[in-house]
Amino acid sequence: VKTTDGYTVRMFCIAFTKRRPLQVRKTTYAQSAQIRKIRKKMMDLMTREANSCDLKDLVLKFVPEVIGKEIERACESIYPLQNCCIRKVKLLKSPRFDISKLMELHGDGGASEDTGVKLEAPVESSIDQQVASTAPVPGQDPGDWAD
């Protein structure tokens, strides 16, 4: 699937069939025709979601599993699903690097920006001077120090 900003990604989805209420049978297998319909609907939904946004927005959709919940709702009429999510996304191709687009996003970085004000050197405080005067001198006995 190709996103709006030119990235080509391959998305992998996984879903499990859900037991119906009051079901006695231990297993819940969908028939092969139902599986084909579910896969087709998964592909359509994933393609539509990825084509309509850029890569950054697509990644933000993966975290709360928005696409997985949408697939569950859409496939409910075919066969009930549970734990549907996008399990892996591969980045197949990224767009060519364009310096002009980068400059549009981040500005020129030239002299038009405010660079700040020059600061003066800090003046040594009186506390720093007192600490320096009471520092031990090599060869002097610490007992001779004045308190």
Image: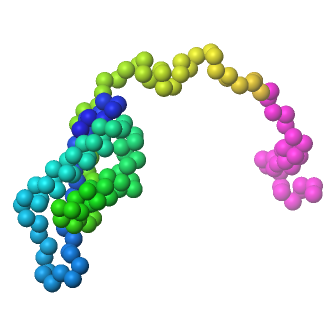
Image position of 73 with respect to 117: above or below: below
User: Where is residue 105 drawn, in percent x and y?
Assistant: 48, 26
Range of magenta residues: 120-147
Q: Residue at x 87, y 59 (%)?
A: 143
User: Where is residue 65 drawn, in percent x and y?
Assistant: 35, 56
Does residue 135 belong to the magenta stretch? yes
Looking at the image, residue 59 sits to the left or right of residue 38; the answer is right
Work out whether residue 90 can be spotted: no
Quadrant of the rendered structure where residue 21 is?
bottom left
| Dominant SS in magenta | loop
Which sits in the foreground, 22 or 117?
22
Q: In the orientation shown, which residue stands out farthest toward the top? A: 111
User: Where is residue 75 drawn, in percent x and y?
Assistant: 22, 59
Looking at the image, residue 75 sits to the left or right of residue 102; the answer is left
Work out whether residue 56 can be spotted: yes
Query: Which quarter of the rendering shows the C terminus?
Result: bottom right
Q: Residue at x 27, y 65 (%)?
A: 83
Image position of 38 with respect to 109: above or below: below
Q: Residue at x 51, y 25 (%)?
A: 106
Looking at the image, residue 85 sits to the left or right of residue 26; the answer is right
Does residue 71 belong to the magenta stretch? no
